[in-house]
Image (cartoon, coloured by chain):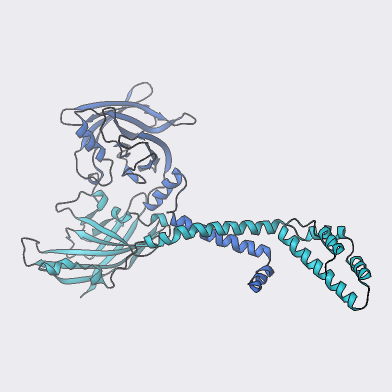
Chain colours: A blue, B cyan
Amino acid sequence: MRGVRRFFDRIPRRLRVAVDLTLAAALLLALYVAAGCPAFGEENEFRRAEKAGMMGPSEIMDWVAVQRGWPSVGYDRVLIGDDGDAILFYTYTTGRGTSSLEGRLLRREKTEGLLLTPLPCGSVNFWQSTEVLPLFLFADDPDAVRAEVLLRLTGEETVTLTGDRRASEGDGSNLPGFFYFQLPVTGANREALESLMSCASTFADYGEDFPAVIRLYDAGDRLLTETDYVIRPRRRQQPG
Amino acid sequence: MESIRFRRWCSLAVSGIRYKPDRERVYAELYGHMEDRYEALTEAGVPPEEAESRVLAAMGSAEETSNILERVHRPYWAWALWAARCLLLIALLLALLSVPRWIMAQDIVKLPEGQRETFALPYREAQGIRDTRTFYAKPMSRASSDGYRFILTCAAGRHIECDDPDWIEEHDEFYLAVEVFNLRPWAQYSGILREFCAVDSLGNVYGAFNRTPHGGDTPLLSGNAYRTGLCTVTWILSLRNFRSQGAEWIELRYDQGGRDIRLCVDLKGGGTE
């Protein structure tokens, strides 16, 4: 034991510090991997999900907090990115409980510069009449400041949703083409909204199509475009 | 021999060394050195008090020695070594608590060797199902993107007949095995192959699992993933509602987000079992 101690005492201190720090770094790296390689931050998780899903790189444009319905507690945060051809949604869950869409990056392609889809928060369960279904509209028209969506939920029922272009936080400038709507849940439309909500899922191919008319208005409230659109489950959006 | 004068001199000489273990070590060395000189003088016949004085005179000024030792024995590397050892100990404890459990939780499977066994369907033989005319294609096509490395390792087509045609109709099946390698640990469980579609030389398209309605007679590329290594996942894929009889090649494709990944299976010149 004394001989071993003498051997180590002969090694210069700088070298011993370097060896100890290298070993500690290796062990901490193993610990990091064993802990599941946490990403430290929402944007890092978003970028990782892009790499893992071979998507992007997109520009993170906005994030939305959606309150989760009972019995879950907390908010889902949805980060929204734009890669030019599609909009990417990344759901980040906070609070208690889990969401089936947590940590999922969903890519929805624009159709002729438009995308209308339920926000993939996955936690709205329509148990309470005060709940709403959040809808997202992207319109690639820089002059559009207001949007109107006529959405047919059932054969007879059509709802009209209006919204202004979303302003980003910070400098208060308007985000290009981002519109958000909230569709209130009623006893009559509950079933239809559950089917509409499933269109946000990666895995659904059941359910109906939801035709819509999208009208865009400029700052002077003049109609810019009126386009027919259909919200359908992703598996039926395009073959191949 | 215990000398108060020696001890006093040594204490003063090492007082500038801030790192205590170094201070104690140098103190012991100086005291031992002074003792050795004292013994040599007393053995030569010098009286003890005079020998003490001579040794102290030879050692010189304790203050000057203290200044020199302070410059030589800076504490910084010693403190750095102490901190590094603490960090190493903490890291070792944490790793011992977590890493073995992580290793045991890795559900790495070993797929059977050989193409036939890789695509084995053990239930079939027991239920009167026979596969005939198994044909093995020549794959080993490779592609890479976003840190992924794809290798199409083997492919096989077979013709299925059943004694009870009411239960399973006679049909053709085709299977592929794709190894997906990615060094990034968080990308190991990606379902990326479910975004691939397949196309053959006849123009048939087998839709991607995540982007095509299931059921019915829709041609579909589907499959399951098996973790076969720390950084490797092997996908066993099948072409549902196979209709590429007579095709010269089949290609797996991914063309989203500006990527263009193609893995080709050459159906010409393969072999039967």
In the image shown, does A114 or B160 lie closer to the viewer? B160
Residue A88 at x, y = what percent?
A: 36, 43
Q: Is residue A73 above or below residue B140?
A: above
Q: Is residue A72 above or below residue B164?
A: above
Left or right of B145? Residue B83 is right
Residue at left 35%, top 21%?
A: A221
Asked if one can make out residue B266 in the rendered structure from this viewpoint, the answer is yes
Left or right of B28? Residue B170 is left
Residue B40 at x, y = what percent?
A: 87, 76
In the image shown, does B120 or B222 lie closer to the viewer? B120
Residue at left 38%, top 34%?
A: A65
In the image shown, does B242 or B84 lie closer to the viewer? B84
Which quadrant of the figure has residue A179? top left
Asked if one can make out residue B149 in the rendered structure from this viewpoint, the answer is no
In the image shown, does B251 or A98 lie closer to the viewer? A98
Residue A169 at x, y = what percent?
A: 46, 31
Which quadrant of the figure has residue B28? bottom right
Q: Residue furthest bottom?
A: B44
